[in-house]
Image: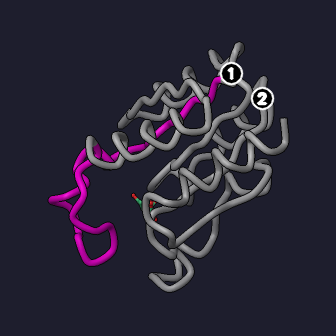
Amino acid sequence: MRILVIHGPNLNKLGERDPEHYGRLSLADVNAGIQAHARTMGVTCNIIQSNTEGGIIEAIHGANGYQGIIINPAGFTHTSIAIRDAIECAPVPVIEVHLSNVYKREAFRHHSVTAPVCVGQIAGLGQWGYVLAMTYFVNQS
Ligand code: DQA
């Protein structure tokens, strides 16, 4: 099984950015944890990070050959109709993950334009959200 993980804007700043909400792990630490669990599940996992809408959209369009996408669209979650449309026509199912519990935060984070076109959403479980999403794809296949 092949899974694509897409991290959206500013997630390259994990570890230094707002640790109260995102913890102290760097993106490299989070990715190492994802890869360690992928190996135990027999999953080949490719991970990308993009700070641009276009980069994320092209990654989604290019996901042929994967069985699922796990995406944290970060700030674009709340604004990007273009990423929402890309997910809607994605070649494979998509799960949305947020490190923080967006529903405990500012009101503008309570609405996701992308979640309605995803299989589901996991929020507030930190790096474990990615592992749980991967577990779902493995067990659904
Ligand atoms: C986030 C939540 C978003 O509201 C925020 O803009 C992010 C990160 C999360 O993982 O909790 O950049 O997606």
The quadrant where residue 65 appears = top right
Cβ of mark 1 under 8 A from ligand 1:
no
Task: Decide whether residue 9 is among the magenta residues.
Answer: yes
Give the residue at mark 1.
66
Residue 12 position, x and y percent, is 27, 43
| Label 2 or label 1, whichever comes before in sequence order | 1
User: What residue lies at 21% left-to-right and 62% top-to-bottom?
Assistant: 17
User: What residue lies at 51% left-to-right and 72% top-to-bottom?
Assistant: 124
Task: Decide whether residue 46 is among the magenta residues.
Answer: no
31 shown above or below 25: above
Bounds of the magenta span? 2-27
Q: Is mark 2 on a helix, strand or loop?
A: loop
Q: Which colour scheme is used?
A: one colour
Q: In which quarter of the image is ligand 1?
A: bottom left
User: What residue lies at 28% left-to-right and 68% top-to-bottom?
Assistant: 23
Q: Is mark 1 on a helix, strand or loop?
A: loop
Disc number placed over residue 92 in the picture, else none: 2
20 shown above or below 40: below
Q: Which amino acid does label 2 sit on?
A: Val
The quadrant where residue 121 appears = bottom right
48 shown above or below 124: above
Q: Which amino acid does label 1 sit on?
A: Tyr
Residue 107 position, x and y percent, is 53, 82
